[in-house]
Amino acid sequence: MSSNQTNLLQGTLDLLILKSLKTGELHGLGVSRRIDQITRGAFQVKPGSLFPALHRLEEAGWLTSFWGESENNRRARFYRLTKAGERQLGHETEEWQKIAAAMSHALKAT
Amino acid sequence: MQFRSRLESLMRNLLRKHEVDADLDEELESYTTMLADERVAGGICRSEARRSTLAELGGIEHIKQSVRDGRTGITFELLWQDGRFALRQLRKSPGFTITAVLTLTLAIGANAVVFGVLNALVLRPLNVPQAESLFLIQHGSDSYPDYLDLRQRNRSFDDVAVFAIRQSGLDTGKDPSNVWQYETSGNYFDVLRIQPYFGRFFHASDEHGPNSAPYVVLSYAYWHNHFQDDRSVVGRVVRLNKHPFTILGVAPPGFQGTILFFASDIFVPIVNHDQLSGEKILNARESHWMFEMVGHLKPGVTPAQATADLNSVDSYLKRSYPKEEGSEPYALARPGLHGDYLNAPTRAFLTGLMLLSGLILLAACANLGSLFAARAADRSREVALRLALGSSRNRILRHLFTESVLLSLAGGVAGLVASIVLLRRLSVWQPFPRFPLHVPVSPDANVYLVALVLALVSGVLFGIVPVHQILQANPYEIVKAGSNGAFARRITVRDVLLIVQIAICAVLVTSSMVAVRGLMRSMRSKFGFDPRNTMLVDTDLSTAGYTGERVPAMQRRMIDALQAIPGVDSVGSVNWPPLEPPGGWQGMVYTDTTTDLSPSNAAADPYLYNVSPDYFRASGTSLLTGRAFTWHDDTNAPRVAVVNREFASKILGSIPDAVGRYFKLHDGARVRVVGLVEDGKYLNLTEGQKPAMFLPLLQSQASWTWLVVRSSRDSQELAAAMRSVLRDIDPGMVLAIRSWSTELGGALFPSRMATVSLGVLGMMGAMLSITGIFGMAAYSVSKRLKELGIRVALGAQRKEVLQAALGRAFKLLAIGSGVGLVLGLLATKVLAFIVYQATPRDPLVLAGVVLAMLLLGLVATWIPALRALSVNPLVLLHEE
């Protein structure tokens, strides 16, 4: 466990999951590996938060899931963005950028 | 979009739960396998890879639970789970469950019944349009001319209606019967703004002076019961006290007049009163016989303004007719309960009753709370384990509340059902056979709502009691040490509460036993007559059209005709039987030497009965000395009387020499005593010994006639024979034939009522005491289980174990019962006013109370005692 493990805010986790699925469908382990990769190891998603989040997003209608074959021929549950999920990703990205800009501006101010 | 998706998830989660859970299991299994795969690729053997993966995940079940907790519809699912869990827990302890549900049934049922009565009599407005502006004008009593003046001269009311109540004989062609009638002003129905069910009502325009409106309106109930819903009755001519009246229409269902508890059969115009009654009082200003005046206030007029207006009319009337007018001022009151005369006492009584039943419910909740605390103490180890395993305190509290709310809902529903049954029965109950008095208290939505809310509130109330215990629980300490052994030995608030409950219960048990004994004694006591095997016929010859000399002739004809029926032993007549409510005639008497016959010189005011020669034999009144009357004691013979022993000793000064002495009546007539009869009861059963005199029918006429028929024949058969014989004499006469024992129901009513209500209260008290003692004993046993186990291990006998476990409960029971018994015996002094010969010096009552309280203690401690006796020290100590 890295010592500089950042605490994941719930909204951040949702955004990261949506983002990780932007490029295509993934299973649970795939999603956590992808997040690890795109955040350059800053965020390591534990299954205890990953699976509740995946199911929550699916119930909200932003993801759909289906059973498929993994790269190692294992049966696995895959997740894919829905149209609504893509819209949500765009929306949340915008929000996040606004906040990030505001925060970095605030922290730079003297 | 999001909403639809949520809804779909909800349906899936609720309906295909197994599928959803299986999917989750498989998903996590595949996740674990894939993680392990990565490690195997890294060069670790498969089983070791799997083990380390699982260890790192830190519990698959935990992940599953967090996924489940986030699902849509989780609330329903949790409720369902909690409900099932609670039911399972309750099923495990049936003794507790039954006690709790029964207690709540009684307590909530009592509240629902009292609230139902309060709702029907006080809270609910009268069932007429715009009831909020309808007022009763209250003024002692008025004459009909007063009413006419008031109606004309007041400026506050739209219109004012008046009515009086009377009984008449209604002859519809076959078997005439008595009916109760409202004699109303012509505008009565228009003032109340009600419409007929069908046909028409009479109106002010139908009145053209005395006896000008021979019309009848039937109440719905009377039409339904006596005309079998026949709509062709409109226009039919019936005879009221032998006068032809035309049926105009039928009043709407549910409308029986403006007095809630009095169900009138018919309505007739008051202008025909003189014709119906044979009196001449309609236009007499000094005859105050109006029962109530009602009217709607004009818009914008306040009750205070109206009262002032009425009193200014009143002062005008007082100036014009100083002799005839009463002195009471006018006041306004809500209609329905005869103004403030009944309204205030009814309201006060019901409010008191409501308060009492509320207290009973509260006490029941307190007791159930301590039972609940005992359960929580028993389960402290289980709770501690669950806390230690990661269950939240929230969840455990939720379980407790689910249990208490389930119990209270079960009790609430059962109590409500019981109260509905009771209220329905109360609505059709007529305590007095001769009067149409009843309590119209059919339950409505308000009652259901109140019962439900009370159930929920009490569930939460007694569920709260053990909360403190759970929140304080330290799982580590409890699992390590078992339940804390120290049990408070000082007197707590709870103990005092329990003693008070037991004392109240003992008071009620004592009082109800005294009442029951008194009632039993009064059933066997000497009435001064023998109601067994005796039938009464109630007739009023004046309403049947007999006057003057024809009255005694008719009475004699009826007596002779009844005497001729085979199997009849004797027949007599009396103007009003003793113990018949509302009470008999009285007449002032003077000693023979008194010359100034003013009321202050009267020797006594004895009960007065006009009887036929054979009355004493027919009524079973024993003649001690002298003779009974004969048909020769008529207006040509000297005045004679038969008196009772009390009369003889009080007025004549001697019992053995009473026969042959004289006394004087109020009209100055000198009367010779010819016979002496036993003492009896005349007005009610609890009265002291009263003087009574009997005068011969032919020397002292009365048009009221009750025929007394003694016969050992079957009462149904005899009644039919009597009816046909009397019908042969006069087919138009009203006859009410009942057995004397039935008729006495009215006289026994107060003591019966007292006994029943004390019994009900006693039951409530017993219930409270049982749950109270049960709760306290159960708590004490479960807290001291370990101590008891050690005692058993050290060789304590069963008796010693029981003493240790339940000694405290029995000590409280003894103190409470002792206090209650003393108070109860003191209370019987009050009871003696209602119940005949209520006496505390009755060994049977004392023994009964002690036995009842012991039994109660035994029932309450049965389950805890069994538990204390079944303590197995090995198992107990092993658990440590």
Image: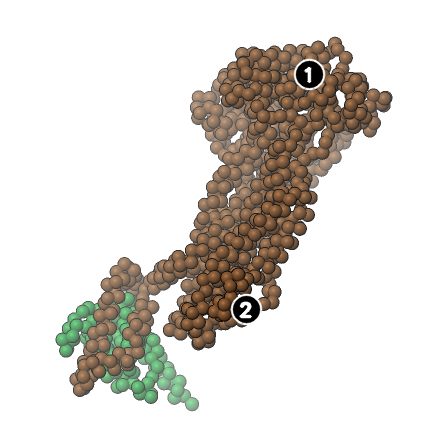
Q: Residues within 10 Å of mark 1 (few under 14, many from 20)?
A: many
Badge 2 marks a residue whose secondary structure is loop
Residue at coordinates 37% horizontally, 83% vertically from top-left? Answer: A103
Give how far across and how far down residue B30 sits, in percent: 20, 74
Residue at the bottom extreme of this rendering:
A110
Residue A101's tag is none
Residue at coordinates 16% horizontally, 75% vertically from top-left? Answer: A74
Residue indicated by mark 2: B487
Residue B697's tag is 1
Callout 1: chain: B
Residue at the left extreme of this rendering:
A73
Classify residue B830 by image quadrant: top right
Q: Earlier in the sequence, mark 2 or mark 1?
A: 2
Callout 2: chain: B
Q: Residue type at mark 1: give it.
A: Leu
Give how far across and how far down residue B207 sits, in percent: 59, 22
Give how far across and how far down residue B482 sits, in percent: 46, 72
- In the image, B774: left or right of B43? right
Residue at coordinates 28% horizontally, 78% vertically from top-left? Answer: B57
Q: Which chain is green?
A: A
Along the viewing direction, whichever of B412 and B303 lies nearer the viewer: B412
Along the viewing direction, whichever of B229 and B508 lies nearer the viewer: B508
Q: Residue type at mark 2: give it.
A: Phe
Give how far across and how far down residue B464 sits, in percent: 49, 63
Badge 1 marks a residue whose secondary structure is helix
- In the image, B642: left or right of B878? right
Quadrant housing the N terminus of chain B: bottom left
Q: Colour of chain B?
A: brown
